[in-house]
Amino acid sequence: MSQVTISVKGLSVSYERKRVLTNIFLELEAGNVYGVVGPNGAGKSTLFKAILGLIDVNNGTVVINGKTIQDVRKEVVYVPQKSDVDWQFPATVYDIILMGRYPHKKMFQRLSKTDHDFAHQALEEVGMTQFKDRQIGELSGGQQQRVFLGRALCQQADIFLFDEPFVGVDITTEERIIKILKKLAAQQKTLLVVHHDLSSVKNYFDKVILLNQRLIAVGDTNTTFTEENISKAYGAQLPILHKTGGLS
Ligand SMILES: Nc1ncnc2c1ncn2[C@@H]1O[C@H](COP(=O)(O)OP(=O)(O)OP(=O)(O)O)[C@@H](O)[C@H]1O
Ligand SMILES: [Mg+2]
C-alpha cells in the first residue's frame, strides 16, 4: 500500500447554520489521481478549502504528510474554481506562472535560473509559451485556465488540488494536461481533481471520491464508480445525466 499523504478524520463544515459537509473520513495515498465527483453544492470546493485550512471547520482534523497544513503549505498546490479568481489583477502570463515559485522562496530572495527554467517548462506544458507576455485579463477563458494550471505545475509540489481545472479548456489541452497529471502521480505525487464530466471519469482517474455532503464512496474507479454509487451521489439529477449521455 502506498503512503497516506492526506488524512481527513470526522470532518464537518457549516456555513452560518447550514451544514455542508458531514463526518468525512478519507485516507488518500501518494501515486494517485483522485477524481472528486458530485453534484453542484455537494461540498467539493468546501472540502478543498477545508483541506487547505482556508475555512473554519466545525469538527474533525486534516493531516498532510503527518503535519498540519500550516507546516506543509509550500508542498500543496491549489487551483481554485474559476469563479473564485480575479482576472483583472494586472500581471502577465509569465508573472502568474512564476508565482508558482514564490512559496519556495524566503522574503526578498531572488528567483534563480532554476526557477525560470521551471516556469518555461510549465509554459510549454500548458501550451502558453507564445502568450507569455500577455496580460492575463486579455486571455480567453480556456487560456486563463491553462495559465493557472501552469502556475501549479511550476510550483513542483507534492500535493495538487484542482477545482474544475478543465472548465472552458479544449479537449486537446485537457487530454495533454491529464497526461501530465498521470505522470506526476507516477512520481508519487497526490492529485485531487474536481470533475463534472462523468463520461471521462474512468479514463482520467485511478481513484474516485463520490461526495454529496456525506462521503458516498471512495476507492478504485473500476469498483467504486458504479451506477449504484453514482445514483446515491446525484439522486434525482441522475435521469438528466442519462439523457445527455453522461453515463454511457
Ligand atoms: N462562503 C459561503 N457562504 C455560505 N454558503 C456557502 C459558501 N460557499 C459555499 N456555500 C454553500 O455550501 C454548499 C457547498 O458549496 P461548494 O462550493 O462546496 O459546492 P461544490 O460541490 O463545489 O459545488 P459546484 O459543483 O457548484 O462547484 C452550497 O450549498 C453552497 O451554496
Ligand atoms: Mg465547487
Image (tube, helix red, strand yellow):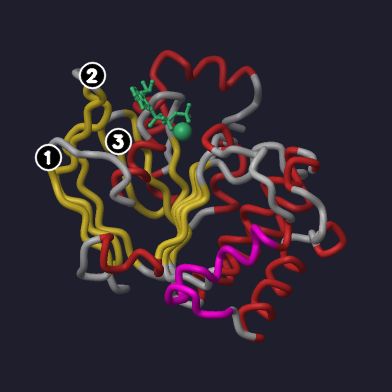
* Side of 202 where 74 appears, left or right: left
Whichever of callouts 2 and 3 sits on the residue coming sooner in the sequence is: 2
Which SS class for mark 2?
strand
Q: Position of residue 58 (x, y in %)?
A: 14, 35
What's the amino acid at mark 1? Asn
* Membership of 102 in magenta stretch: yes
202 and 27: which is toward the camera: 27
Q: Is mark 2 within 8 Å of ligand 1?
A: yes
**Image quadrant containing the C terminus:** top right
* Residue bearing mark 1: 59
Foreground: disc 1 or disc 3: 1
The residue at which mark 2 appears reads as 18
User: Mark number for residue 216?
Assistant: 3
Q: Magenta stretch?
A: 95-110
| Three-letter code, disc 2 | Lys
Q: How many marks?
A: 3
| Image: 38 above or below 133 | above
The N terminus appears in which quarter of the rendering?
A: bottom left
Query: Callout 1 environment at 10 Å: few (<14), some (14 to 19), or many (20+)?
Result: some
